Amino acid sequence: MGSLTGFRRFARMGLGGALLLLATGVVGDSAVTEGSKAAGLETCVAPTAEIRRNHMDYLKHDRDATVRKGIRDTRFSLAECVQCHAEKDSAGAYKPVNAEGQFCESCHSYVAVNLTCFQCHSKTPGSAGDKAAMRDDKRNGRQALGLLQSIDPLTLRRDELARLHATIEGN
Amino acid sequence: MSHNNDQPDLRRRDFIGKTVLAAGAASIAPGVMLTVANAGSDAGVSSKVRWGMLIDANKCADGCSACVAACNQENGIDLIERPAGQSDAMWDAQRPQWIHKVKLKDNLTGEITNLPMMCQHCEHPPCVDVCPTGASFKRADGLVMVDRHTCIGCRYCMMACPYKARSFIHQDVAAQRTGTPRGKGCVESCNLCVQRLDAGDQTTACQDACNREGYQAILFGDLKNPDSEIARALKAHNSRQIRADLELNTGVRYSNI
Ligand code: SF4
Ligand code: SF4
């Protein structure tokens, strides 16, 4: 590495950047749709690379737990993907996540994989009057409660908290 | 580069290993709350509970269909659009209906009885017996449901059900409720508002609607809990299963029929 000239090192960085862009499949900093809830969050429920590669397996595993055993506080949930990744239009209504250019569709069309979830599943988060959505929110509140018992949380640095998907509410 | 990069973060795993996740929130200072997304429980529903219904046909009013309307709304059935050009007769025959309002007339006396009919949540469900893929299944808490991920739309279960409780989705569906996915080619039926039960509620949409109308014909609850309102009512009053001769031990019971 020490033998690299400044110029070569620069070229390598450029190449790495280009590959990263290819990997995301979307030109820009992030594949996340601007204006969605996800755009304001640091990470998804797992590191981005892991989610990108394994989300279909995660969702398939957890759907069986949910449908067959009634386990609703699974780590991965399609309803929560939609909740987080749906973007609002100028009138404030949600755009379907499988509409052209939206989060799910843009990547699936880039990799040419059929997106069939939304033949049956709702493509937009429940509206404010939607009781089911309100219950989802209630449940998320419950799900977000966890407790770090063996350590003093105040000793954690902010990036360590973020890595645990912990958030500090209040001040 | 920030930590949300393209590689699994091993430090994170290590760090989680040293901590214990449990229910509850840590209050680390006044006004400060620390919350952590949990990895999900794996207990699921329990067979200590069996959900059921007791319907009092005397209280079910002639001409009322509040339960059907509430069911349609709760489960997004009202979002299904009629295919262009379909006749009234075809639409009425094919649109999904989880609750049928049934009117019985005693030909000798002329007495009229009204009652709502839905999936009876059989303990020994014929729909599950005949399903070739395992899509029809009975949950531990007694709910009989269809797993649409594995249903192939063969409709054997519709033929096997003695109560005509099941519907088939014949066309593409444009909009669904989050709690009730639905698409062309699968069979569905009443699931006792499973999305409510799993969220901790203990009422169904039809029961709420009937109570709102002031009839209180539908009582929903846990058949296995001797202290529940429904168990006490079943103990105190005469009730029956429809087609009890089939020995399916239905979870939905009727009184005054
Ligand atoms: S009433 Fe019909 S659909 Fe419901 S459990 Fe019994 S057989 Fe299955
Ligand atoms: S229609 Fe679906 S649920 Fe009914 S028997 Fe066939 S595969 Fe099973």
Image: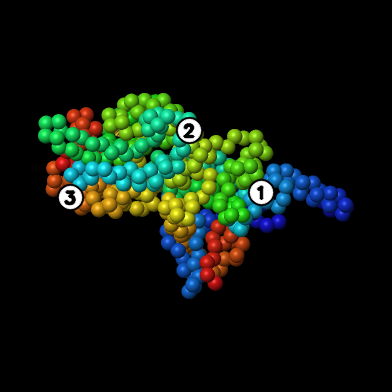
Residue at coordinates 63% horizontally, 50% vertically from top-left?
A33
Residue B199: x percent and y percent? 39, 52
Horizontal side of A105 relative to A65 (left or right) equals right
- Whether residue A128 is visible, yes or no, is yes
Label number found at residue A31: 1
Identify the subunit bearing mark 2.
B
Secondary structure under tag 1 reads loop
Please state which of residues A101 and B112 is positioned toward the viewer in this rendering: B112
Residue A9: x percent and y percent? 83, 51
Label number found at residue B232: 3
Horizontal side of B142 relative to B183 (left or right) equals left
Q: Earlier in the sequence, mark 2 or mark 3?
A: 2
Horizontal side of A142 relative to A4 (left or right) equals left
Mark 1 residue type: Ala
User: In the image, which is nearer the foreground, mark 1 or mark 2?
Assistant: 2
User: In the image, which is nearer the foreground, mark 2 or mark 3?
Assistant: 2
The alpha-carbon separation of the residues under discs 3 and 1 comes to 57 Å
Residue at coordinates 26% horizontally, 36% vertically from top-left?
B102
- Whether residue B168 is visible, yes or no, is no
Mark 3 residue type: Arg
The alpha-carbon separation of the residues under discs 1 and 2 comes to 37 Å
